């Protein structure tokens, strides 16, 4: 039996036999776009909550974990990341973290659904404060097509900040897309992909790793981190390098960067890299 | 609105405005003891689930995270832990991990409610396989009184594996108990206490740390780790040392121990220690 005395939004993770629910104050938005359904709720304890096709994308309170851990380990694993591409990431939280790195000269974000970004600007403005940064290049386009049109070896870092592998994001979990990413990265370039829960999506993580291996990537590593708003509360990102190795976390470089973080630090980075699939 | 087409057990974390639910196959046990109400469910995806007074204690699938992270960082932070006391821990998962360490000569477990252990033996037998180890000393008694009767400086490690600070465990979060632990530990001895969620129980973690500081402990450290079955999926343990410092995680010592773990390793240990309260 589930609680009924308050208003709740629940995400049922059928594949995991669990559900996570938030008590809500109000339903702020409901949008049906060409790609998906987007809802925004005001919760009692988690700030605002964005939901796409019934799956929680982020809350105000805990998105820092995901955004910091998808970005900073990857950026610090590259000696000098200048040219960054984000596929997905419409809430702009990933873009915001990337642009904290002074080495970055350009960060292009290719989100298929402009409405995600418009609703983020309205309900998660703290994530969109860097959208006017001259290095930010926001495109609303299909990431699968975009990556095919990139010049070979033209990027230092590709960040795949996608929804679950259902609906418009499905192709982002396929081998062709990963091979296209490999082609677009310079030698020493890094690809990082959000890779779901180490506890309940191990088959999916193995699929991502297989795709990376088949594409030619080396030094494939899966990092674990807490992410309360996603099923199981334990999430991962999987990194890989084209013709090179991931640089280890360097406390001196982190210190020199002046980066302000709430979860990420070099020791946390190393610990996350030591995550093994249970 | 919460899912209704299946049978669910939900824990509503009112203080966090969230709920976590498990789809269940059957309700295996319902016991009302002198101390609390205990239920055991068979879930569809998480094995068995034990609930005390409506709060999830553990599931078959994910308890390894909590039990490994409550024990191994503490045991490896002491140079040679021989005499160990567990307060609470009736499911015997903590005891089982402690006894993997060959240095341990005696591990006493003081659980107030014998029924917790009897139900664990029945429904979580994998956690109770070491209960017959000659070093294991299972007592069913009040931990608050037990610790007062310990000889001063007679223990190397005290592990507080309690329920939430409501009901019988409330006193375990108070300053008097922590001061009694300090008295019972030898110099260089370590106390570790489960300390709830770094995201949603920061006030409680601060209270535990304050208690430890006031009792005279030094090197007080809070470790974070994923724990899917608890609210937010992100949990913590707080360690402290009497007249000494926590030893750093040592890969060579871990290797030599022959310990088999699913989550813990020395790099994960270091990363967990680097957790800062967000």
Image: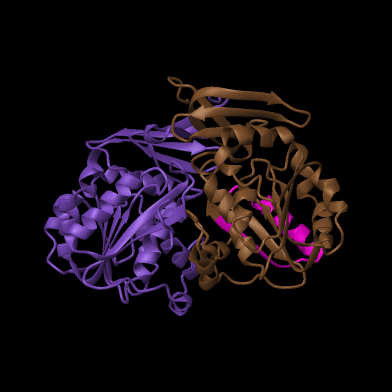
Chain colours: A purple, B brown
Residue at the location (59% across, 59% down)?
B72
Q: Nearer the viewer, residue A168 or A107?
A: A168
Q: Is residue A101 left or right of residue A173?
A: right
**In the picture, residue B225 is in which quadrant?**
bottom right
> Where residue B172 sits in the image (x, y, percent)?
77, 48
Outermost residue to the top: B5
Residue at the location (52% across, 43% down)?
A46
Q: Is residue B105 left or right of residue A109?
A: right
Residue at the location (64% across, 23% down)?
B30
Residue B55 seen: no
Tell me if residue A27 is in the magenta stretch: no
What range of the chain is rendered magenta?
B199-224
Q: Please tell me how many numbered marks the rendered image carries.
A: 0
The N terminus of chain A lies in quadrant: top right
> Where residue B139 sits in the image (x, y, percent)?
77, 43
Q: Nearer the viewer, residue B207 or A87?
A: B207
Q: Is residue A8 left or right of residue A156?
A: right
Residue A11 seen: yes
Tell me if residue B221 is in the magenta stretch: yes
Q: Nearer the viewer, residue A77 or B114?
A: B114
**In the picture, residue A31 is in which quadrant?**
top left
Q: Is residue A102 left or right of residue B236?
A: left
Q: Is residue A215 above or below residue B134?
A: below
> Where residue B110 sits in the image (x, y, percent)?
76, 46
């Amino acid at each position: 039996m589930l609680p009924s005395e308050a208003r709740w939004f629940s995400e049922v993770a059928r594949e995991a036999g669990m559900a996570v629910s938030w008590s809500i104050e109000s339903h702020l938005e409901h949008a049906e776009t060409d790609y998906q359904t987007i809802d925004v709720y005001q919760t009692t304890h988690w700030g605002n909550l964005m939901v796409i096709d019934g799956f929680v994308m982020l809350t105000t309170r805990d998105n820092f974990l995901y955004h910091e851990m998808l970005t900073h380990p990857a950026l610090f694993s590259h000696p000098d990341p200048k040219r960054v591409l984000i596929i997905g990431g419409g809430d702009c939280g990933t873009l915001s973290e990337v642009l904290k790195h002074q080495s970055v000269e350009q960060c292009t974000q290719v989100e298929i659904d402009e409405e995600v970004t418009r609703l983020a600007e309205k309900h998660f403005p703290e994530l969109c404060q860097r959208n006017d940064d001259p290095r930010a290049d926001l495109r609303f386009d299909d990431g699968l097509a975009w990556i095919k049109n990139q010049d070979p070896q033209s990027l230092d870092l590709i960040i795949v900040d996608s929804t679950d592998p259902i609906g418009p994001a499905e192709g982002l979990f396929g081998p062709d897309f990963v091979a296209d990413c490999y082609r677009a990265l310079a030698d020493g370039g890094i690809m990082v992909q959000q890779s779901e829960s180490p506890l309940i999506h191990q088959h999916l993580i193995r699929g991502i790793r297989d795709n990376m291996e088949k594409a030619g990537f080396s030094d494939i590593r899966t990092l674990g981190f807490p992410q309360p708003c996603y099923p199981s509360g334990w999430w991962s990102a999987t990194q890989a390098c084209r013709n090179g190795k991931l640089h280890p976390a360097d406390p001196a470089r982190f210190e020199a960067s002046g980066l302000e973080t709430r979860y990420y630090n070099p020791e946390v980075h190393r610990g996350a890299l030591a995550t093994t699939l249970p």
